Amino acid sequence: DQQVKQNSPSLSVQEGRISILNCDYTNSMFDYFLWYKKYPAEGPTFLISISSIKDKNEDGRFTVFLNKSAKHLSLHIVPSQPGDSAVYFCAASAGRINDYKLSFGAGTTVTVRA
Amino acid sequence: NAGVTQTPKFRVLKTGQSMTLLCAQDMNHEYMYWYRQDPGMGLRLIHYSVGEGTTAKGEVPDGYNVSRLKKQNFLLGLESAAPSQTSVYFCASSLGPILPYEQYFGPGTRLTVT
């Protein structure tokens, strides 16, 4: 039973425009959320995170929004660049219960068109 | 500083054969993890370790064993490979628990069991 869901397997966006990636979760105990980025033949790398006490976190071109009541988070990339073409994984942790386990979504493949 | 490395990068096994995947990190991290990634699914935790000499089961441990004899190495063993274990395996390490410590991933091992 997947507790973290990324319902859009792929997203295509023009360079310079906004990319919006969505993620839904079912476990109300999740209190920490992360986004990872993965290029082919490489491991995932950490991109940005947000704690459940916040509803927004920004880091340069990347912003994550958290809507706890809807159990939904999104990642905004503005402006999108060709180097952003990658697979993006949403992940969640219930840190208060266990401090080792991340639950991952299936990923969204982003393609940035020139 | 190589980060997290995995050996081998690719492997093909026949059903019933055994093998060991090696993960090494040079960041002096306490926590280490083994994940598998299957199509349409997120990364799932197989086993993890919170320090040298310790191991624990994750969410999909059946058919796998692990050992952490040295702090820098985390070995994943398949005693009798099955086609269901065809997957991409990722090792990760972190300085401490998820919050606030980032997990660093290796490049992955693609395993095919025929």
Image: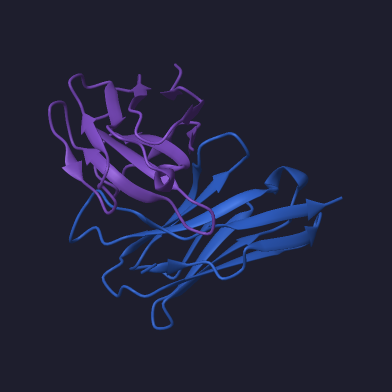
Q: Position of residue B32 (x, y in %)?
A: 28, 34
Q: Residue at x 13, y 33 (%)?
A: B54
Q: Residue at x 24, y 44 (%)?
A: B97
From this view, report whether residue A97 is shown above or below residue B13: below
Which residue is farthest bottom? A69
Of residues A54 and A88, the one nearer the viewer is A88
Name the quadrant containing residue A102: bottom left
Instruction: Name the image quarter holding the N terminus of chain A.
Output: bottom left
Name the quadrant containing residue A7: bottom right
Of residues B68 and A82, the one nearer the viewer is B68
Q: Position of residue A82 (x, y in %)?
A: 77, 46
Q: Position of residue A16 (x, y in %)?
A: 80, 56
Q: Residue at x 46, y 42 (%)?
A: B86
Which residue is farthest top? B1
From this view, report whether residue B34 is shown above or below residue A88: above
> Quick check: A100 left or right of A16?
left
- In the rendered image, is residue B102 in sight? no
Q: Residue at x 75, y 48 (%)?
A: A81
- In the rendered image, is residue B16 in sight? yes
Q: Position of residue A3 (x, y in %)?
A: 37, 68
Of residues B38 and B97, the one nearer the viewer is B38
Which residue is farthest left? B53
Chain A palette colour: blue
The colour scheme is by chain
Chain B palette colour: purple
